[in-house]
Amino acid sequence: MAGAGFKVWNTGDLINASEFNTYIMEQTVMVFASSTARDSAISSPSEGMFAFLKDTNTLTFYTGSTWSNFIGEGDITGVTAGDGLSGGGASGAVTLNVDINSESSVTPVSSDEIMLADASASNAIKKTTLANLPISTATQTALDNITAGTSSLTIPIEVKVADDGSGSQNVFYMLNGTDSGAGTKTPALDVTVGYKYKFDISDSSNSGHPLKFSTTKDGTHNSGSAFTTNVTESGTAGSANAYIEIEITPETLGTATSTGSTVNKLFYYCPNHSGMGAEGNLSLYPVSASAGVSLGLVLALS
């Protein structure tokens, strides 16, 4: 008899076996080894009765048509989690969402702390500071290779082609760092042994104007030839990712002479059109320090 537990009993009232069993079951939490044991023992459950299952440590109750978990997976709804946070849902497990766009910006300092899952401790949640964050293995390898002398730092230089102002002669212009626009005609750059200088010739203005180096001014247009020692070329001028790169090493400079080295200067030129290098050159070894030029390695485009 459903609802017997809510009946008001008076002294002298008679209670039959069905009412008594229903009353006891509604007022008592019964313990079973499993849901199978529960269903076997209670063939006709009453709405509202409780049963505890030992195998899952779950408290269940009878809804009138089925057994449901009273303690178990649930939802959190209607809760304000805080700035940039949300959670809950219509069904399923509770989730916590962080919206980074809702947070204010800050300039991090080395003592700032962040949380992480420690992979060496079964992903236990721990904290560390920005100062203690490791660099990537790729970056560390690159630094180690530079320190060991097995690789060089690369200086990028963008190359464009434009008229020199005369209206009749195209020349090479170059950009680096924060330079903008067409670039600078015949710039001067200081360089050091161990560096690579990568001339990016992918700009469309370079189409038909590949850049090359020669120990002779204007290169092949003046009976010279292309200089290839420690020079790497890739792609077609004017196309994506095209470049020519030169690495400054003792081999690039060559053998010492009374005036400096075997290779004092490298002129840049276009093999298809004369005059495009103008007076620009790579001065690999200064002839004299008396003229105010230090005895370091200088890249002079003048």
Image (spheres, grey):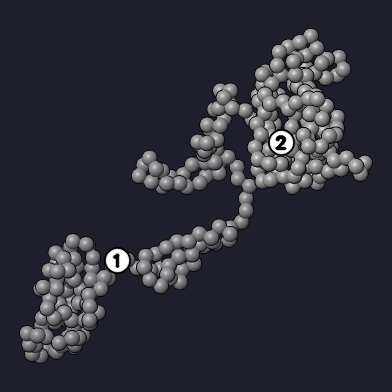
Is 157 located above or below residue 41 in the figure?
above
Who's the residue at 10% across and 81% down the image?
21
User: Which amino acid type is marked by label 1?
Assistant: Gly
From the image, tell me which residue sits under label 2. Answer: 199
Circle 2 Cα neighbour tier, 10 Å, few/some/many (<14 / 14–19 / ≥20)? many
Q: Single out the mark in the foreground, 1 or 2.
A: 2
The image shows residue 94 at horizontal and vertical percentages of 39, 64
The image shows residue 250 at horizontal and vertical percentages of 67, 18
From the image, tell me which residue sits under label 1. Answer: 72
Return the residue nearer the eye: 205 or 100: 205
User: Which amino acid type is marked by label 2?
Assistant: Phe
Q: Does residue 260 appear to the left or right of 80 in the view shown?
A: right
Who's the residue at 53% across and 33% down the image?
140
Return the residue nearer the eye: 236 or 4: 236
Q: Which label sits on residue 188? A: none
Is 257 located above or below residue 136 in the figure?
above
Q: Does residue 146 appear to the left or right of 236 in the view shown?
A: left
Return the residue nearer the eye: 271 or 186: 271
Who's the residue at 62% across and 28% down the image?
152
Who's the residue at 71% across and 36% down the image?
199
Quadrant of the rendering where the C terminus is positioned: top right
Circle 1 Cα neighbour tier, 10 Å, few/some/many (<14 / 14–19 / ≥20)? few
